[in-house]
Amino acid sequence: MRTYILRRLLISFPLLLAISFITFLFIQLAPGDYFDTLRLNPQISPETIRMYEVQYQLDKPWIIQYLCWLKNILKLDLGYSFTQKNPVTKVIKSRIGNTLLLSFSSLLFTWLIAIPLGIFCAIKQYRFWDRLFSAFSFIGLSIPSFFLAILLLFIASLTGIFPTGGMRSANFEEFNFFIKIIDILKHLAIPTIVVSLGAIASLQRIMRGNMLEVLRQRYILTARAKGLPERRVLYTHALKNAINPLITIFGYHLSDILSGAALTEIICNWPGLGSVMLSAVRSQDIYLVMGTMLISGVMLIIGNLVADVLLAWFDPRIRYE
């Protein structure tokens, strides 16, 4: 397993290189650049713009720009964000913690709800609770996340139960440690529900289908015929095989959450990486776009690696040599 993980990590470097090259190429193919906006501002002289272009090698061919960016990465320098007026590393460092907090809370919330609910619905197939939760799942899948976010924020503004945006209250610094944690959790509630609802509905349906398929296998029939307790049949023999496909989904889910949370972060005013990514793409802030795409690529690779390791752990038939 250790050799396999090492080999996967080595393969990830050319993969990240390909992701960064394609991203850089697409940015170059888009018409205009960030300095076109500055050229429309009469307060900024052409000499100033020219100075910036020379300073950041943006006056050179795009392939030279890309190679310079790669060279700087070796020195842990991701470039300079023109929109944020700060180094890209500093911008990402100030935001990624908030995005990871939202991502992992929604990931945890999703899996803690979806897996037991899928098992429960499979056991109660075609009964009242199965039909009820199936209806909720279809509703959850059909509601757009931006509409749900606006709806929950509207309800929060009427009831005052949860804050209507941001990550902290105005008087956050006056709270003690435990009240600060509660304050952040209250601000985290609406974005977490918005990001998780669609994923819960989807995973619940997949888990239900997998569990029903496994429960129809002959070895489950044999286990029941031998008189094994139903709880042992379900949670020892059926669950391990039913959950395997979901572990594969977990790898993709980890990176999807980062991109899926972007819109929610903007609507809920959550100070994460999503709003910065959107702003960077819209303004063609080339180095900030490259930095955020690199983070997304790393999360995709880590997610898939964790999923493969978990698969080998759950399923003894899988061996990596």
Image (spheres, rainbow, N blue to C red):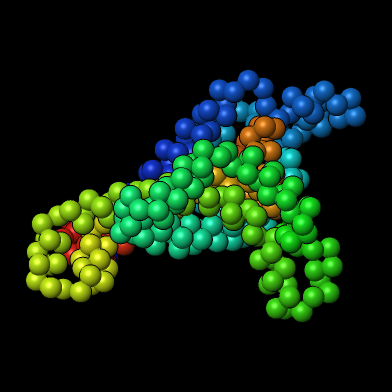
Q: How many marks?
A: 0
Residue farthest to the top?
Answer: 31
- Taking the spot 37% from the left edge, 44% from the top edge, the residue there is 14
The quadrant of the picture occupied by the C terminus is: bottom left
Image coordinates for residue 286, horizontal then vertical, percent? 62, 36
- Taking the spot 9% from the left edge, 71% from the top edge, the residue there is 226
Q: Identify the image quadrant of residue 232.
A: bottom left
Residue farthest to the right?
Answer: 43
Image coordinates for residue 217, horizontal then vertical, percent? 14, 55
- Nearest the eye: 256 or 246: 246
Image coordinates for residue 32, horizontal then vertical, percent? 67, 22
- Nearest the eye: 303 or 55: 303
Q: Is residue 237 above or below residue 259?
A: below
Q: Is residue 4 visible?
A: no
- Taking the spot 83% from the left edge, 74% from the top edge, the residue there is 174
Q: Is residue 109 visible?
A: yes
- Nearest the eye: 237 or 6: 237
Q: Identify the image quadrant of residue 263.
A: top right
Q: Identify the image quadrant of residue 111.
A: bottom left
Image coordinates for residue 46, horizontal then vertical, percent? 82, 25
The quadrant of the picture occupied by the N terminus is: bottom left
Residue farthest to the front?
Answer: 128
- Taking the spot 53% from the left edge, 33% from the top edge, the residue there is 24
Residue 73 located left or right of residue 31: left
